[in-house]
Amino acid sequence: MDNNLNVKILESYVEIDKIHDDINNKIFNFITKANELVELSDDDYQIEKTLKLNKISLKGYVLDSDLCNQLNENNMNDYSIDELKKYFNQYESSSNTDYSNYLLALSLYELIEDIEGQVDSKIELEINELSNIIQDISNIKNLDKNDYENAYYNYKSLLDNCFKEDKLDEKSYGICIQILNDIFNFYISGYPNIPDEYLYHEDN
């Protein structure tokens, strides 16, 4: 039994689990604030199923604002989110108009980017950890989607062998399988989706 390996896997799992909880909290935070924007925008903005679609929707909502249209007319199309926030704040104070809805949309866009960055970090950490046992696990980044199934079973059989040969104890083996599943789920399905109950349905 490789006790060092088992201890390392457990320690990594604690860190991965912490990041996972943080991602879930941020997604819940996004849903809460996105619901505020649905109300503030009089349903012009709706919560979408995927993070990518929410980014597109938020971008469209902000770019449709009178301020962005004005910037566009003045050929000012190249600005960062921070610069746009400043424009909204300046315009808000000089024109006495409430732009909290657009500022909220911008902060939601940034929150999605934060969530995506954290998911990327978690997957990177998981790949690094498994590479102690499965040397070529990082090859998943270059695999064709049609090869995922074969690769998954090859990697899983390596973990099975480590368990049979007593290199991994039962708990570490279970964690490794969970990490392997998580990595493949990400490469097959992408970033986490927004749960259905938070989406707008016509029949509601």
Image (tube, rainbow, N blue to C red):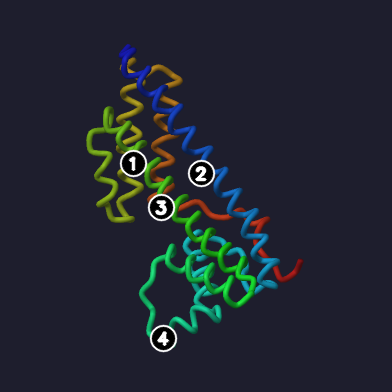
Identify the image quadrant of the N terminus: top left
Q: Residues within 10 Å of mark 4 (few under 14, many from 20)?
A: few
Q: Tell me if label 2 and label 3 are in contact, CB under 8 Å.
A: no
For label 4, the residue is 74
Compare residues 23 and 191 and report the one nearer the observer.
Answer: 23
Mark 3 residue element: helix
Q: CA distance from mark 1 to mark 2?
A: 15 Å
**Most extreme residue toward the front, as rendered?**
94
Residue drawn at (65%, 61%) of the image = 199
Residue drawn at (68%, 68%) of the image = 40
Q: Which mark is residue 3?
A: none
Q: Amino acid at mark 1?
A: Glu
Q: Earlier in the sequence, mark 2 or mark 3?
A: 2
Q: CA distance from mark 3 to mark 1?
A: 15 Å
Q: Which mark is residue 188?
A: 3
Closest to the camera, between mark 3 and mark 1, is 1
Mark 1 residue element: helix
For label 1, the residue is 124
Displayed quadrant of residue 196 = bottom right
Mark 4 residue element: loop
Residue 65 is situated, as x and y percent measured from the top left of the image, at 55, 78
Q: Residues within 10 Å of mark 3 (few under 14, many from 20)?
A: few
Q: Earlier in the sequence, mark 4 or mark 2?
A: 2
For label 2, the residue is 23
Q: Amino acid at mark 2?
A: Ile
